Amino acid sequence: MSVEHSLLGKDTQYPTQYQPDVLFPIARAESRQQYAHIDGITQGKDWWHIFEISWLNPHGLPQVAIGRLTLPASSPNLIESKSLKLYFNSLNFTQFASRQVFIETVEQDLSKAAGATLKLELFQVDDLKITQPTGICIDDLIPERLSEHPDATLLQHDMTTQDNIEIELYSHLLRSNCPVTGQPDWGTVFIRFKGKRPCYRSILAYIISYRQHNGFHEQCVEQIFADIWQLLKPEKLMVYATYTRRGGLDINPCRVSDLSWMPEPIRLARQ
C-alpha cells in the first residue's frame, strides 16, 4: 500500500484495545527498482528499538520493557512507523498470560504485516547498554565541495594512493527528512569498506548531501549503499545507520554485501 494512505502525519486516536489491523505495511519494491541489480540491497536487517512498551500481566498490573525488533531486509514490506507506535499503544491495556505470550503475539502480528519472520527481544528498562562508536570519525574533515541533495558524483577514490584497505568510518552528520511530514531525522552512519582507498572527505560530503533529502530511513541507507557500491566499487561493503528516536521508536537499517560482515545491533548515546 502507498504511504499516502497511511496515518503518518494525520491526527489520530490512540487505541486502548488490542488492534493489530492498525499496522500499515509499505512495499519495499518500488523504492528498490533502480537498485534491483545490487544484491546487498536485500541483504541485512532493520533493527527497531521500541522504548514505550507496556502490557498487563494476569493480575492486571502494568509491565514495561524496551523492545528490539529485528526485521530482515529481504522482507517484502517494511512497517510504517506511526502505525507501529499505534499498535504498541493498543497493547497497553491488554492482559497476557505471560511475557512469552506477549512476545509471540507481537511477532505473529508484525511478521504478518512484513511478510517475513520478525523477532522481538525484550529488555528490562535499565538493561539496554549505550555503545561507543568504533572506527574513524570523519566529521572534522573539510570536503572540497558540497551539495544540497544526494549526489553520488561526490564520491571519489583517494587519488594519492592505489592501496587497498579495509576500514570502518562513521559520521554523526546524517540528516534527512520524513517524506510525508517533513520532520527531520538524525542519525549516525557507519561505513565498513574493503577495496581501493576512498577519499574520506568525499564520503563526508556525500553524507552531508542528504540534509534536505526526503526519504525513509531504510531507503536512505539503501541509496547510500548502492551509490558507494556503484561509484567506489568495493570488494565488500557495510552501511549501517543508527537513527535517533521519534515517537518512542528508533530505526536502524543495515545493508551488507557479505553476510559475514553483519554487525551486532547497537544503541548510541543519542538514541
Image (spheres, rainbow, N blue to C red):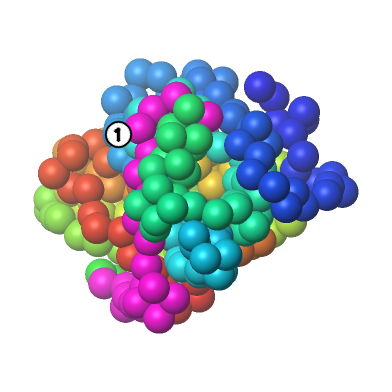
Residue at x 52%, y 29% (from the top left corner) = 113
Asked if residue 126 is positioned above or below residue 208 in the image, the reply reads below
Query: Camera-side residue: 123 or 188?
Result: 123
Q: Name the residue under label 1.
A: 43
Q: Is residue 121 visible?
A: yes
Badge count: 1
Task: Give the vertical position of 29 relative to 190 (above or below).
Answer: above
Q: Is 196 covered by the magenta stretch? A: no
Report the residue at 44% width, 60% height from top. 67
Residue 242 locus on image (x, y percent): 44, 60
Q: Is residue 1 left or right of residue 198?
A: right
Location of the N terminus by quadrant is top right
Question: Which residue is pictured at 29% across the width and 25% down the height?
Answer: 39
- Where disc 1 sits, the SS reads loop
Q: Residue at (35%, 77%) from the top-left corner?
A: 127
* Residue 119 x/y as whole percent: 35, 44
Examine the image and state in which quarter residue 123 appears: bottom left
Asked whether residue 157 is in view, the answer is: no
Assign the magenta stretch its main secondary structure: loop
User: Residue 199's x, y, as percent?
Assistant: 33, 57
Q: Is residue 123 magenta?
A: yes
Magenta region, residue range: 113-134
Where is residue 263 shown, x and y percent of the image? 23, 55
Judge left or right: residue 30 versus residue 16. left
Left or right placement of residue 217 versus residue 267 in this view: right
In the figure, residue 10 lies in which quadrant? Answer: top right
Q: Which residue is outermost to the right? A: 11
Q: What amino acid type should be assigned to the residue bearing mark 1?
A: Gln
Toward the front, the furthest residue is 59
Depth check: 179 or 195 in front? 179
Mark 1: give few (<14), some (14-19) or many (20+) Cα within 10 Å: some
